[in-house]
Image: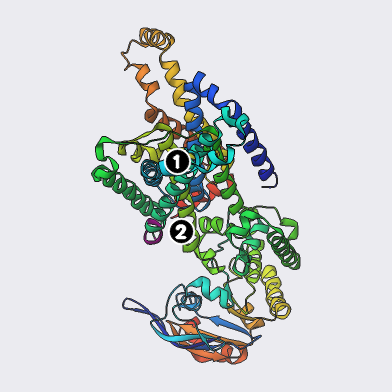
Amino acid sequence: MKYARTILAVFLFLLFLFALIGERPFSAHFAYYYDILINIGINIILAVSLNLVNGYTGQFSLGHAGFMAVGAYAAGSWADHLSPGLINFIAGPNGVLTFVLKPFPILQPLGLPTVLADNAALVVATLFGGLLAAVAGLAVGIPSLRLRGDYLAIVTLGFGEIIRTLILNIDFLGAARGMSVSGTYTNIFWTFGFAAIAIYIVLGLVNSTYGRGFLTVRDDEVAAEAMGINTTKYKVIAFVVGAFFAGTAGSLFAHYTGYLTPEGFNFFKSVDVVVMVILGGMGSTVGVILAAVLLTILPELLRALAHTDFVPAFQRGLEGVIKIHLPPLQGLLENRLILYSLLLILLMLTRPQGLFGDLAGSRRRVASSASK
Amino acid sequence: MKVDRCTIRFGGLTAVSNLNMAIGNHELVGLIGPNGAGKTTVFNMITGVYQPTEGDIFLNGERLNGLKPFHITAKGIARTFQNIRLFVSLTVFDNVRAAFNLHLKHGPVHALTRGGKFKQEEAEIAAQAMDLLKIFNLDRFRDVMCKSLPYGDQRRLEIVRALATKPRLLLLDEPAAGMNPTEKGALMTLIEFIQEKFDISVLLVEHDMRVVMGICKRIYVLDYGITIAEGPPDEIRRDPKVIQAYLGE
């Protein structure tokens, strides 16, 4: 935490420079890599915020995609109905910035009013999406956080499915047709900007006497209550903060793809994020960030590998040696769910605490579940 | 602290029946009884884990019924646990610091802005936690994971953590369990020292007669949820009902 603020400030400044100079040519020339970068940012936000709930506070939520959907659709509707007004207000023919910048014709080629208006529209819609998701988090959290472990997992899973089904049946949100979002304003700066804010808030909370409350809830709820800690309040706060950032991630996603379908926020999306948290190590923000990066890049790498000549040749060779006909390896490499399962099994066997998780905590959890 | 005619029933089972108990300021009171007599239930009732089915609990004239455990701790009753319940993923230092949470003046917003007031309060908490650890000679384990402390030190750390909530009444649930005679002797001195140093009342639940008889000024004896005797150690020792409950006819 000591250097976290300095690192984040430098990082944000570099991002800002990149956004100012390099982003457009980069996204035009390297659209594929740009896509991966944005997805990494969104996944970092999702994983870091879920880590506050599942990792630091020790609750098991399986509904992160549900909150992401709330944020995405909220921001999407906002973008459709309210963003044009905002943009017009800032950068329209009679807009504020157009008027302010009129005496400086030298700045005209930068297109400053439009750029700033787009960014403002993105941020406002994203905050709106986050807030609505936070409200959903509060509504789900207060009744369900009395439950523990598996029971909470089932309730949050149910919530995610309810949200998805609701969207499927609301015509205003496009139902099964999906919803197109006007204005694809998401850029590297705000994606990683919100990721940095999420990281900062989670680390800032956890590294304080106030935030140590989250960890005590994870370790021993009964003892935490006996030490004067309102465990329900802490669980709800963790849930609401987690939901807020899931919502912002949803909004960034909506503003990036420009098109939303309910299927994009199904159970498997939640599992993706849970896998990132478990792989990185519950309660290790650095680990979870690295896992988010790794699990975003890995499917792309494997897809690339699957389409080389090497794989079919390797399969033919292998089948020649073992004299057994195998299912096509190409499909295996392209299916990330099969791969994730294998990865998780391997991880649980070798490092149950996750790549960067604390050793003492997980040993205790294993020991206590064994003694129950 | 006053327990007024409290009864607690779980379904058909009456765990504690018509309990009257009073602990004055700066008093060291013992609560004993054979296994299953309801001692820990009394603890859980006082600290709000269970609600009494009948009767009231008061602290300095204030009724505690219906309050959540964390509220009761805030009123000034802290406890330890029969089976040690430390925050196992935290260090010794953080275990103690976590207990200061109760009296925090700053909230989540201050934790994020990290202003001067926040830093000052965190520094004060760190200093107070260190002082407490020093008193109990645990300061050398400051950055050790509490799980790796020896058993006796874990028990003492639990007491330190309870004291960090600044209680007026400390409830100790079988602190001598699993200790050898030398450790038990040290524990007795420690409990008397705590009571003196922090000027608090102590209610001690204990199995070990030597410990209870040695330090408590007044003792309550429970059997099957019923108070069968109350008085100073010498009377209790000679009470035929107590002897019968412990040794049989």
Pointer 2: residues within 10 angstroms few (<14), some, or many (20+)? many
Q: What amino acid type should be assigned to the residue bearing mark 1? A: Asn
The magenta stretch spans residue A144: yes
The residue sitting at 38% across, 58% down in the picture is A139
SS for callout 2: helix
In the drawing, what numbered circle is on residue A88?
Answer: 1
Q: CA distance from mark 1 to mark 2?
A: 39 Å
**Magenta extent:** A140-146
Tell me, yes or no, whether the highlighted magenta stretch contains residue B3: no
Chain on which label 2 sits? A
Is there a contact, CB below 8 Å, between mark 1 and mark 2?
A: no
Residue A346 point in image, percent of width and height: 46, 32
Is A333 rendered above or below residue A360?
above
Both marks 1 and 2 on one chain: yes
Location of residue B33 in the rendering, given as x and y in whole percent from the top left corner? 50, 80
Q: Secondary structure at mark 1?
A: helix
Residue A75 tag number: none
Mark closer to the observer (1, 2): 1
- Out of B33 and A65, give the one closest to the viewer: A65
Amino acid type, residue under disc 2 in the picture: Val
**Crowdedness of circle 1 by 10 Å Cα count: few (<14), some, many (20+)?**
some
Query: Residue at point 49% right, 57% down?
Result: A237
- Looking at the image, which is closer to me, A362 or A110? A110
In the image, residue B152 lies at what x, y percent? 65, 63
Residue identifier under label 2: A236
